[in-house]
Each structure stands twice: as C-alpha cells, then as structure tokens.
Amino acid sequence: MLNEKVHVLLNEQINKEFYSAYLYLDFANYFESVGLDGFANWYRIQAQEERDHALLFYDYLQNNGARVTLEAIAKPDKTFEEHIDVLKAGLAHEEYVTSLINDIYAAAYEVRDFRTMQFLDWFVKEQGEEEKNATDLIDKMTLFGGDPKSLYMLNSELGARVYTAPSLVL
Ligand code: FEO
C-alpha cells in the first residue's frame, strides 16, 4: 500500500501534468496567432507529451491499488510581449515541474518506497531532457530570432518535430 503523503503527491502530479499540457497548448495557440506554425507544432507535441505524463501517473496509481481523484485544471493565464517570453516561460515551468518530481521522490525516499522511486527515475531523467530542450530553444531564438530568414528556418525546423510516445512502459 502506498504511503498517504506519496499517494497525495502522485495524485496531484496528474493534475500538474494535465495543466502542463494545457499550458503548452496555449503556447501553441499563441504561435498560431502570430503565424509561426512550426513553433505551434513544437508546443502542440509538447502538450501531447504532458498528457502522456499525466496518464503515466494515473496508471501507476491504478496499478498499485491507489485511488485517483481528478481535480479541476487551472486556466493558463500568461500573456506575452515577445515570442521569446513564451520560450522562457516554458523553461521556468519545466524547472518548476522538476521541483515537483523531486518533492515526490523525497517523500518516497523518506518512507523507503523503492517502487515509487524507481518509477520516478524515468521522470528525473525526462526533466533533465525537458530543461535542456527548453534552454536550447531559448538559445536558438536568441541567436537567430531577430532575423526574418533565420526565424523562418527555425520555424521550419520546429515544424518537423513529430510525436513519439513515451519510452516508459508500466
Ligand atoms: Fe511532464 Fe514537461 O514535464
């Protein structure tokens, strides 16, 4: 049986991951509105990945006989002055998610819940990749975003991203 605190945190993470999906869908929405369809594609796929993350937490609880409670998903309410502000908000959000994963890990560690720690290992690695991707995007935008031709090419590059299901199988 799962420790109550670990159970609560894992359940909350379902909501946080769905919120992440909602947030990134809103980022895609922003980029659609300014005609950058490649950036929109990139964030739309990011939203799909976040939905997958939510379902992984959902499945983990189900597989361990722990009840899932679904809560309301908050409204994404960020507004942006410049394109790069969206990318920076993405990195800040991933850093926040990393802190959430770390908090669950710490709670599991405290009660010697090795199964949950092993499940979370995938997310610890994933967060490293998410932060790197967000940082790389900011770097590219900083370098090339000011020039229309370069922005067009960057937009095309991001438009080529395709969705792949997560490598974690429960
Ligand atoms: Fe589910 Fe982007 O972390």
Image (cartoon, grey):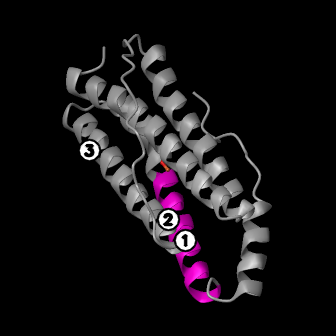
What separation in Å lies between label 1 and label 3 (alpha carbons)?
A: 31 Å
Residue 88 drawn above or below residue 100: below
Q: Secondary structure at mark 3?
A: helix
Q: Position of residue 56 (x, y in %)?
A: 52, 30
The C terminus - image quarter: top right
Q: Quadrant of residue 19?
A: top left
Q: Quadrant of residue 159?
A: bottom right
What separation in Å lies between label 1 and label 2 (alpha carbons)?
A: 6 Å
Label 1 Cα neighbours within 10 Å, binned few <14 / some 14-19 / many ≥20: some
1 vs 3, front mark: 1
Label 2 Cα neighbours within 10 Å, binned few <14 / some 14-19 / many ≥20: many
Asked if residue 122 lies left or right of residue 161, the reply is: left
Residue that numbered label 3 is attached to: 103
Q: Main secondary structure of the magenta part?
A: helix
The three-letter amino acid code for the residue at tag 2 is: Val
Residue that numbered label 1 is attached to: 83
- The mark that comes first in sequence, 3 or 2, is 2
Specify whether residue 33 is painted magenta.
no
Under 8 Å from ligand 1: the CB of mark 2? no
Residue that numbered label 2 is attached to: 86
Q: Residue at x 58, y 35 (%)?
A: 52
3 vs 2, front mark: 2
The boundaries of the magenta stretch are: 125-144
Q: Position of residue 48 (x, y in %)?
A: 63, 41
Residue 147 drawn above or below residue 160: below
What separation in Å lies between label 3 and label 2 (alpha carbons)?
A: 26 Å
The three-letter amino acid code for the residue at tag 3 is: Asp
Residue 21 drawn above or below residue 60: below
Q: Quadrant of residue 106?
A: top left
